[in-house]
Image (cartoon, rainbow, N blue to C red):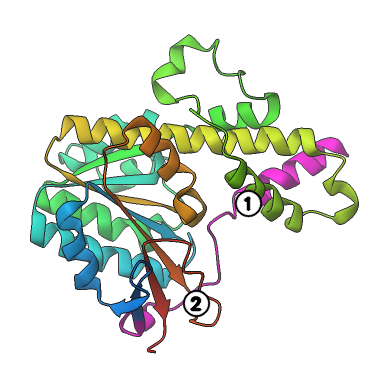
Amino acid sequence: MKKILFMLILSIASVLGCSKNFKHTDIDNFSVYSAQSMSKTTINGIVNAMQDADVIFIGERHDDSFTHALELSVFKKIFSKYKNVALGMEMFEKDVQSVIDSFLNGEMRENDFISRSRAWNNYKTDYAPLIIFAKKQGIHVFAANIPRNLASIVAKNGEDSLLSIESFKSFFNKPILKSDDYRKLFINFMSSMMPQENSMSHMTNMDNLFMSQLYKDATMAHSINSALKEFKTAKVFFLCGEFHSNYHLGTVEQLLILNPNLKLITVAVEDSIETADFYKADYLIIKGKI
């Protein structure tokens, strides 16, 4: 029973950042708000704000086609304006960086790339347009995430379970902090997805699962920081599930501890103005004209 429940918890974790599907035809039907000024702006307003920023986080729902179409549009606009841009992605794990490089360099066929990079099931519809654009324009793409098998070890065995695995140490980073606010959000979300009678009796598993989440955040933060060091004048366009960037927690918080001088922009997508949370991000893209 415990094993079955643990697998259920892992399955729930995989839906963090997921939402209902929306058609690509909705891409022209949205409004943009600046959370700081509480006023309407535009996509170009976000792009112009990148003039003084190092990283833009697009917090996505992984199965929301509206957001994916929007990501490509914003990415193209940022590249057009600033040229020196790097694309970072939660969707690829650090141990497949050489596979990404080979594909971008024209040394590997796309089908082989998809297989060897362990691309997500929605790669062809939702992420391939970004990768193909980056390939055509010579844009560096970096895999940011901890390999899923290593994250699974933490989820099962706890905080220090990876520290003795010498051969994989370049593929993960231990979290710098354990944010109480972030933990509360995570635990509340996970508990809401579990049967009520089991939620309190498996907090040890929940704590380990949260630690696995932190390892993902820390590894992605280090990946971004490394890219900024390698490509010194580049602006990083970073894609992640919204839970990793909402409220400036998760990967955003870990990155700012690594490098407090960075200037970051976060973007969240909301389904309606009635349900929009203006504390989530610096800019909100709200579906529908307002």
The residue carrying mark 2 is 271
Q: Quadrant of the C terminus?
A: bottom left
Q: Which mark is residue 185?
A: 1
Q: Outermost residue, front direction?
A: 37
Viewer-proximal residue among 99 and 264: 264
Asked if residue 58 is positioned above or below residue 214 in the image, the reply reads below
Residue 241 position within the rendered picture, expressed as x and y whole percent measured from the top left: 47, 53
* Residue situated in front as seen by the camera: 7 or 193: 193
> How far is mark 2 from mark 1, CA to CA?
20 Å
Residue 110 lies in the magenta stretch: no
Identify the residue at image location x=55%, y=10%. Answer: 164
Pinpoint residue 123: horizontal percent, then vertical percent.
Answer: 39, 55
Asked if residue 11 lies left or right of residue 4, the reply is left
Q: Which residue type carries mark 2? A: Asp
Depth check, front residue: 168 or 176: 176
SS of the residue under disc 2 = loop
Q: Position of residue 185 (x, y in %)?
A: 63, 51
Q: Residue furthest right?
A: 197
Q: Position of residue 32 (x, y in %)?
A: 33, 76
Q: Residue furthest bottom?
A: 290
On-image quarter of the N terminus: top right
Whether residue 13 appears in magenta in the rendering, the answer is yes
| Eye-nearest disc, 2 or 1 | 1
Other residues around mark 1 within 10 Å, as few (<14) / some (14–19) / many (≥20): few
Residue at 20% across, 61% down: 49
Secondary structure of residue under mark 1 = helix
In this rendering, position of residue 13 left or right of residue 60: right
Instruction: Determine whether 266 is above or below 153 in the image.
Output: below
Q: Which stretch is magenta?
A: 1-30
Q: Which one is in front, 164 or 222?
A: 222
Give me the residue at 48% from left, 55% from top.
247
**Callout 1 amino acid:** Leu
